[in-house]
Amino acid sequence: MGHLTFSTSIHKNQFQKLIKEDNTYPDDTERIALFYIISGNSDLYRKRSYIYDFRNHGIKKCLQNEGVDFSSGMKSLIRLGFNLYNGYEDNSTSPASLFYSLDEDNRIIALNAISIRFIL
Protein backbone atom coordinates (compact mmCIF):
# COMPACT_ATOMS: atom_id res chain seq x y z
CA MET A 1 0.00 0.00 0.00
CA GLY A 2 2.97 2.27 0.10
CA HIS A 3 3.29 5.09 2.58
CA LEU A 4 -0.02 6.72 3.49
CA THR A 5 -0.31 9.95 5.44
CA PHE A 6 -3.17 10.09 7.92
CA SER A 7 -4.59 13.21 9.53
CA THR A 8 -4.81 11.57 12.98
CA SER A 9 -4.28 8.21 14.66
CA ILE A 10 -8.08 7.84 14.66
CA HIS A 11 -8.06 8.22 10.85
CA LYS A 12 -5.38 5.53 10.57
CA ASN A 13 -7.22 3.13 12.93
CA GLN A 14 -10.55 3.62 11.14
CA PHE A 15 -8.85 3.10 7.76
CA GLN A 16 -7.26 -0.14 8.95
CA LYS A 17 -10.66 -1.37 10.22
CA LEU A 18 -12.28 -0.70 6.83
CA ILE A 19 -9.46 -2.43 4.94
CA LYS A 20 -9.72 -5.44 7.26
CA GLU A 21 -13.53 -5.61 7.12
CA ASP A 22 -13.46 -5.55 3.32
CA ASN A 23 -10.37 -7.78 3.06
CA THR A 24 -9.00 -5.30 0.53
CA TYR A 25 -6.05 -6.37 -1.61
CA PRO A 26 -2.96 -4.18 -1.05
CA ASP A 27 -2.88 -3.16 -4.74
CA ASP A 28 -6.57 -2.17 -4.91
CA THR A 29 -5.96 1.57 -5.04
CA GLU A 30 -9.60 2.21 -6.01
CA ARG A 31 -10.97 0.85 -2.73
CA ILE A 32 -8.02 2.13 -0.71
CA ALA A 33 -8.72 5.69 -1.91
CA LEU A 34 -12.44 5.33 -1.10
CA PHE A 35 -11.73 3.92 2.37
CA TYR A 36 -9.16 6.65 2.99
CA ILE A 37 -11.87 9.24 2.38
CA ILE A 38 -14.51 7.47 4.48
CA SER A 39 -12.13 6.86 7.39
CA GLY A 40 -10.81 10.43 7.33
CA ASN A 41 -14.15 12.06 8.05
CA SER A 42 -16.00 11.20 11.26
CA ASP A 43 -19.47 11.76 9.75
CA LEU A 44 -18.73 9.52 6.76
CA TYR A 45 -17.19 6.88 9.00
CA ARG A 46 -20.32 6.81 11.19
CA LYS A 47 -22.47 6.45 8.06
CA ARG A 48 -20.17 3.99 6.25
CA SER A 49 -22.82 1.27 6.08
CA TYR A 50 -24.91 3.61 3.89
CA ILE A 51 -21.96 4.22 1.57
CA TYR A 52 -20.33 0.82 1.10
CA ASP A 53 -21.66 -2.75 1.27
CA PHE A 54 -18.92 -4.77 2.96
CA ARG A 55 -20.71 -8.08 2.41
CA ASN A 56 -21.00 -7.62 -1.37
CA HIS A 57 -17.88 -5.43 -1.68
CA GLY A 58 -19.45 -2.52 -3.54
CA ILE A 59 -20.68 1.03 -3.23
CA LYS A 60 -24.29 1.86 -2.47
CA LYS A 61 -26.58 4.45 -4.07
CA CYS A 62 -26.41 6.62 -0.96
CA LEU A 63 -26.48 9.97 -2.76
CA GLN A 64 -30.09 9.28 -3.77
CA ASN A 65 -31.04 7.84 -0.36
CA GLU A 66 -33.24 10.35 1.44
CA GLY A 67 -33.04 8.24 4.60
CA VAL A 68 -29.49 9.40 5.34
CA ASP A 69 -28.42 13.00 5.78
CA PHE A 70 -25.17 14.07 4.14
CA SER A 71 -24.01 17.69 4.08
CA SER A 72 -22.87 19.17 0.77
CA GLY A 73 -19.24 18.66 1.81
CA MET A 74 -19.87 15.03 2.68
CA LYS A 75 -21.60 14.49 -0.66
CA SER A 76 -18.55 15.98 -2.39
CA LEU A 77 -16.26 13.54 -0.59
CA ILE A 78 -18.55 10.63 -1.46
CA ARG A 79 -18.66 11.69 -5.12
CA LEU A 80 -14.88 11.91 -5.20
CA GLY A 81 -14.53 8.53 -3.51
CA PHE A 82 -16.97 6.95 -5.96
CA ASN A 83 -15.22 8.62 -8.90
CA LEU A 84 -11.85 7.25 -7.75
CA TYR A 85 -13.47 3.85 -7.14
CA ASN A 86 -15.27 3.31 -10.44
CA GLY A 87 -15.32 6.53 -12.47
CA TYR A 88 -18.73 7.64 -11.11
CA GLU A 89 -19.86 10.97 -12.54
CA ASP A 90 -22.84 13.24 -12.20
CA ASN A 91 -23.38 16.97 -12.66
CA SER A 92 -21.44 17.70 -9.46
CA THR A 93 -18.22 15.74 -9.99
CA SER A 94 -16.10 18.44 -11.63
CA PRO A 95 -13.03 19.36 -9.56
CA ALA A 96 -14.45 22.85 -8.90
CA SER A 97 -17.79 21.44 -7.74
CA LEU A 98 -16.16 18.84 -5.52
CA PHE A 99 -13.67 21.13 -3.83
CA TYR A 100 -15.92 24.17 -3.47
CA SER A 101 -17.83 22.79 -0.47
CA LEU A 102 -14.84 21.25 1.35
CA ASP A 103 -13.10 22.80 4.32
CA GLU A 104 -9.31 22.71 4.61
CA ASP A 105 -9.12 19.36 6.45
CA ASN A 106 -11.41 17.64 3.94
CA ARG A 107 -9.51 19.18 1.00
CA ILE A 108 -6.36 17.55 2.31
CA ILE A 109 -8.15 14.20 2.60
CA ALA A 110 -9.46 14.61 -0.96
CA LEU A 111 -6.04 15.47 -2.39
CA ASN A 112 -4.39 12.57 -0.55
CA ALA A 113 -7.06 10.19 -1.87
CA ILE A 114 -6.36 11.34 -5.43
CA SER A 115 -2.65 10.68 -4.80
CA ILE A 116 -3.41 7.22 -3.44
CA ARG A 117 -5.42 6.34 -6.54
CA PHE A 118 -3.03 7.66 -9.17
CA ILE A 119 0.44 7.99 -7.65
CA LEU A 120 0.98 5.14 -5.17
Image (spheres, grey):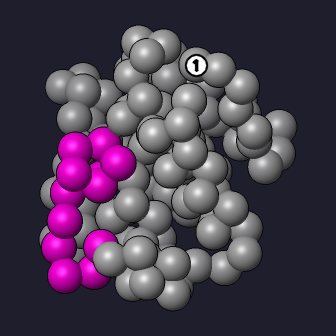
Q: Quadrant of residue 102?
A: bottom right
Compared with residue 51, is residue 12 higher up or lower down, i.e. above or below?
above
Picture quarter with the C terminus: top right
Which quarter of the rendering shows the N terminus?
Answer: top right
Q: Number of numbered discs present? A: 1
Q: Which quadrant of the figure has residue 90?
A: bottom left
Residue 71: x %, y % from top left = 45, 80
Q: Secondary structure at mark 1?
A: loop
On screen, residue 36 versus residue 66, left or right, reads right
| Magenta region includes residue 89 | yes
Q: Residue furthest front?
A: 119
Position of 7 compared to 73: left or right?
right
Q: Residue 57: tell me if it is visible.
A: yes
Question: Which residue position is annotated with label 1?
Answer: 1
Q: Return the x and y of residue 26 as percentages of the image width and height.
A: 48, 13
Q: Residue at x 33, y 64 (%)?
A: 79
Magenta-colored stretch includes residue 24 = no
Segment tinted magenta in the rendering: 82-93
Q: Quadrant of residue 63?
A: bottom left
Give residue 109's position: percent from left, percent from top.
Answer: 63, 56
